[in-house]
Image (cartoon, rainbow, N blue to C red):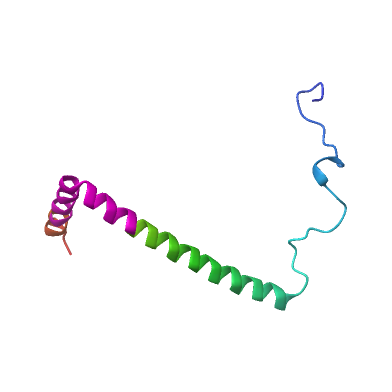
Amino acid sequence: MAADGQRQRNPGSRGVSDAPDAREPQDMTGDAADAQESDAARRRRRAQFLRELHEAKQLRDRVQPRRARAARMRQQMRMRTFRW
């Protein structure tokens, strides 16, 4: 730390190099393909997450039937009192 309380930056530390950032796109076609792939991967991860969430909710409803019934009743009451 410097005398004024701020850290001094050491450009040689933590593997910092003078090379260009590896994440910068080299060409637009590769970048577009990566974007499509990452979008597909994101959709797969989201679908997996939603499946696991649904499974966890079903498990919770099975092991806590009283709480699940109360939640269903609250939801029905909300739907009855909802104004269109």
Q: Nearer the viewer, residue 17 or 57?
A: 57
Magenta-colored span: 55-76
| Residue closest to the far top | 3
User: Residue 52, percent across and down?
Assistant: 39, 58
User: Residue 72, percent across and down?
Assistant: 16, 54
At x 66%, y 75%, the residue is: 32
Image quadrant in which the C terminus is located? bottom left
Indicate whether 9 appears above or below 26: above
Q: Horizontally, is 46 left or right of 31 in the view?
A: left
At x 71%, y 75%, the residue is: 30
At x 69%, y 72%, the residue is: 31
Q: Is residue 66 one of those drawn in magenta?
A: yes
Is the stretch drawn in magenta largely helix, strand or loop? helix
Q: Horizontally, is 22 left or right of 60 in the view?
A: right
Q: Is residue 2 one of those drawn in magenta?
A: no
User: Residue 2, percent across and down?
Assistant: 82, 25
Count of marks, rendered view:
0
Q: Horizontally, is 83 left or right of 25 in the view?
A: left
Indicate whether 12 appears above or below 23: above
Image quadrant in which the N terminus is located? top right
Can you tell which quarter of the image residue 23 is in? bottom right
| Residue closest to the far bottom | 29
User: Residue 19, percent across and down?
Assistant: 86, 56
Q: Horizontally, is 28 left or right of 74 in the view?
A: right
Indicate whether 78 appears above or below 7: below
At x 75%, y 63%, the residue is: 24
